[in-house]
């Protein structure tokens, strides 16, 4: 029996060609934490059946695959998180100066994600970001992506025994899922009854997998696991820092962006936390044990900041429900060798109003404006949120 | 077994170090990573 240290884990991801076709993830990032799981949503079978105990068995509900992925918000990781959240427009730029990727409110790409546990891996597929939360932890930007996915392969069991030399396929049990092989790809390595095989096919029945002729002796019910890849990291970039974040507030987006353009005109914020929600509908439909599609519902966004109180102006804007536009510019390392272009993420909230505004008095401390803004659709600008990211990855990566 | 980095990026494999784009290195037989391809070694005993 082996045991494993969680710190050896990683997340690997890759955008899928379409929502229903998993792909082996190839882009690896260091992971802070995660909680993604497939939940069969069991409930106790409480039918009257001649016993004085709650239940004699559990019954399956509609399965859901969801959870949080927490990463440092570096310009490369943010590219993929944003790509899973919103629609990416046409990228521009080059390797010398960096690539610019515009994101607007729309349907994000579906991703395949591997998260390893020891030598095994969870393959999550059809994954998109439901809630995007950017905050700072001791100066470092941290992103919590709450994802929902169409499914996951982690482990299964053998439905038909394998009897020694010359085995070329295995049939997985449908006890837990009518399509147990969904999520697997040609090239994946499975452990079947303790023997490793590389998949050469995943049959359309989504329960039979093929591999080169191998000697395997395994019984019905023996475990079938997805083996993790050995990680391979590109250059790990630094996260965006609070010290290089500028928040501009203005009467409209142009004024807010101008104010975010210089430290002298930006509003110093002691805390920044931004949440963008897609409110994905992952309701089950016939033909699938879980969601067959993730549907965007109404989007929303919130921004929480804390800044020093100087006048009651913000209180007045709160009670009078005054529109304020906010632009946040997060700048990272220089990209171009002459230091004229940098990694950068710009978030424009075209129309916000204060949902809550507090100026608490605490003994011995300064008075702060603790503010929670609701990001709204700006009917004049025809947009609610715009995000632009400059990093070192070409648009083809997404 | 030799494996080649088939991406356009230099990659770091924990425990093995950096592998430049296009570079091949010796790795264990059970190494598995989609960014690397097994390099078929020529049969040295093969006669022309």
Image (spheres, coloured by chain):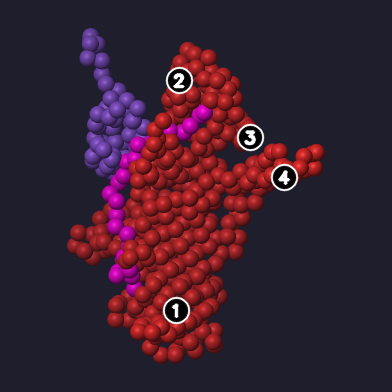
Chain colours: A red, B purple
Question: Residue, x 55% and y 29% (percent of image)?
Answer: A157
Q: Are marks 4 and 1 on the same chain?
A: yes
Which numbered dot is residue A212? 2
Q: Position of residue A107 (x, y in %)?
A: 53, 56
Residue on which disc 3 sits: A178
Q: For mark 2, does the 10 Å Cα neighbourhood hold few (<14), some (14 to 19), or many (20 or more) residues?
A: some
| Mark closer to the observer (4, 1) | 4
Say if the magenta span includes residue A235.
Answer: yes
Residue on which disc 4 sits: A54
Q: Quick one: A358 or A65, which is closer to the camera?
A: A358
Q: Are marks 3 and 4 on the same chain?
A: yes
Which numbered dot is residue A370? 1
Q: Quick one: A341 or A238, which is closer to the camera?
A: A238
Q: Who comes first in sequence, dot 3 or dot 4?
A: 4
Q: On what subunit does the disc labeled 4 rest? A: A
Cβ–Cβ under 8 Å for marks 1 and 3: no
Span of residues in magenta: A223-246
Report, in whole angstroms, how far the alpha carbon at label 4 lies from the one at label 1: 49 Å
């Amino acid at each position: 029996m082996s045991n494993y240290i969680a710190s050896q884990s990683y997340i690997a991801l890759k955008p899928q060609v379409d929502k229903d076709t998993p792909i082996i993830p190839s882009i690896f990032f260091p992971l802070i934490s995660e909680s993604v799981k497939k939940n069969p949503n069991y409930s106790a079978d409480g039918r009257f059946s001649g016993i004085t105990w709650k239940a004699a068995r559990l019954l399956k509900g509609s399965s859901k695959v969801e959870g949080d992925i927490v990463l440092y918000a570096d310009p490369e990781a943010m590219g993929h998180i944003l790509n899973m959240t919103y629609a990416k427009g046409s990228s521009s730029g080059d390797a010398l100066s960096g690539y610019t990727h515009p994101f607007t409110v729309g349907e994000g790409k579906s991703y395949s994600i591997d998260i390893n546990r020891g030598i095994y891996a969870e393959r999550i597929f059809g994954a998109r970001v439901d809630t995007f939360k950017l905050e700072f932890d001791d100066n470092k930007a941290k992103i919590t992506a709450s994802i929902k996915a169409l499914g996951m392969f982690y482990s299964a069991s053998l439905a038909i025994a394998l009897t020694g030399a010359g085995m070329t396929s295995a049939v997985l049990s449908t006890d837990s899922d009518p399509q147990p092989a969904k999520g697997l790809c040609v090239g994946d390595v499975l452990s079947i009854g303790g023997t490793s095989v590389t998949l050469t096919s995943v049959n359309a029945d989504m329960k039979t997998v093929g591999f080169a002729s191998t000697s395997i002796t395994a019984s019905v019910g023996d475990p079938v696991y997805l083996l993790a890849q050995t990680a391979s990291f590109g250059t790990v970039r630094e996260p965006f820092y609070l010290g290089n974040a500028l928040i501009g507030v203005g009467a409209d987006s142009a004024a807010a962006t101008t104010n975010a353009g210089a430290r002298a005109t930006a509003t110093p914020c002691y805390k920044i936390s931004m949440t963008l929600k897609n409110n994905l509908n992952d309701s089950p439909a016939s033909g699938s044990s879980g969601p067959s599609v993730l549907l965007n519902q109404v989007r929303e966004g919130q921004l929480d900041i804390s800044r020093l109180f100087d006048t009651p102006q913000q209180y007045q804007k709160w009670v009078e429900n005054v529109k304020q536009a906010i632009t946040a510019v997060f700048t990272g390392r220089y990209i171009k060798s002459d230091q004229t272009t940098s990694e950068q993420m710009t978030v424009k909230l075209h129309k916000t109003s204060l949902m809550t505004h507090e100026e608490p008095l605490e003994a011995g401390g300064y008075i702060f404006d603790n503010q929670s803004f609701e990001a709204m659709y700006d009917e004049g600008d025809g947009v609610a949120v715009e995000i632009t990211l400059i990093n070192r990855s070409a648009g083809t990566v997404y | 077994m030799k494996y080649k980095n088939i991406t356009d990026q230099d990659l770091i494999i924990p425990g093995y170090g950096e592998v430049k784009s296009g570079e091949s290195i010796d790795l264990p037989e059970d190494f598995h990573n989609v960014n690397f391809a097994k390099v078929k070694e020529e049969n040295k005993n093969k006669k022309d």
